[in-house]
Image: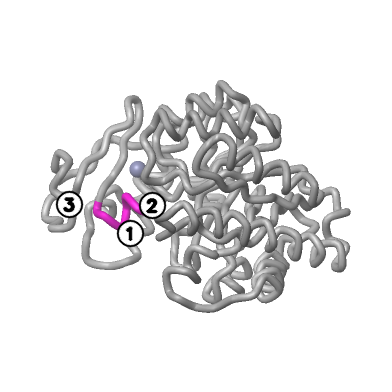
Amino acid sequence: MDFYVSWSHSDALYCEYFTDCPILISAVPDNKNSLRKFKKLPSRLMVDSGAVYYVRKRIPYTVEEIFERQLLTAMPVLHQCPVTFVHVDEPLLNKVTLVEKYGAIERTLINAYEYMNLVRAQNIGKDSNVSILGVIQGYDFPSIQYSIFELKRLGYHKFGIGSLLGRSMSEQIQFISWAAEIVGAKNLHVFGVTGVPQIQAMSRMGISSFDSSRPTKMAIYHQVFYSKPLRTYVIEGSRIDKRYQKISAPLYCNCPVCQENPMDLMNLTHRKYTKVRSIHNYYHFLKTVQPFLRKEDDVNAISNVLRS
Ligand SMILES: [Zn+2]
């Protein structure tokens, strides 16, 4: 199983610190040229549509516009690492009634048809390094089954399941296992996972990959992870979050940033320290989920000497 870290233009450059670092990036305007600043490219790239962003900001979009933006975003690494393009779904976000939810599923399938036509016109789907991923939507077993059946009919072989936020852990695992049963776990990516128990369950099922923004989000909220076991602390002086135990001095840590200046972790004054915390959090999150990933070897950080 591969772990893609969700990445946006203002986030820490994870790939420069870790040898094997798949990333997921959304095709939103600010991310368009951001892979150009990477000195070291990701080991795998997934580009999703950013549809959630457009819906939240009430920005109208067309499937073609987003597809073009996805191609532009991926351009610096195309032919250099495995790239997955995610079709433009209609998020179930804010869809409350059954009619609204069904409408979103239908819209997602219409988009899937248009998207596959664009892929075929550009001839990119034939590249062995490129995968096209259809987004499964559904709110129960029959709707998931219907969504998959239609996506397969349109020519999709790889699938992603999202819209799991807001559901209980057991519901999330149930939805993932329904989808995995129909498409085959090795063809399934799970979007936006935060919980370690879910990651463990997905690993047992043989799921292909998942993504998480947890290391970055926690850093923004002034939180730091330590692994073995995974613990969360909130930095003394933070007014953002009061749920976790406070920490005022860094603990011993082997991550690339703490090896340089561990006190940076505690600094709440500037955005550059959020990036430092993100790298530290990624290291410990990765250490925690490493036993569930495909590769059994330990977390490989790039040494500070090689990086500079
Ligand atoms: Zn550290």
Say which amino acid is labelled 2: Ser
Query: Contact, CB < 8 Å: mark 1 with mark 3?
Result: no
Q: Nearer the viewer, residue 132 or 248?
A: 132
Tell us which disc is closer to us: 2 or 3: 3
Percent x, y of residue 104:
55, 58
Q: Say the numbered circle drawn on residue 9.
A: none
Find disc 1 in the rendering and name its residue: 274
Span highlighted in magenta in the image: 216-222
Say which amino acid is labelled 1: Thr
Residue depicted at 48% across the width and 25% down the height: 200
Find disc 2 in the rendering and name its residue: 278
Q: Residues within 10 Å of mark 3 (few under 14, many from 20)?
A: some
Q: Can residue 218 be seen here? A: yes
Say which amino acid is labelled 3: Asp
Q: Can residue 303 be seen here? A: no
Q: Residues within 10 Å of mark 2 (few under 14, many from 20)?
A: many
Residue depicted at 78% across the width and 52% down the height: 130
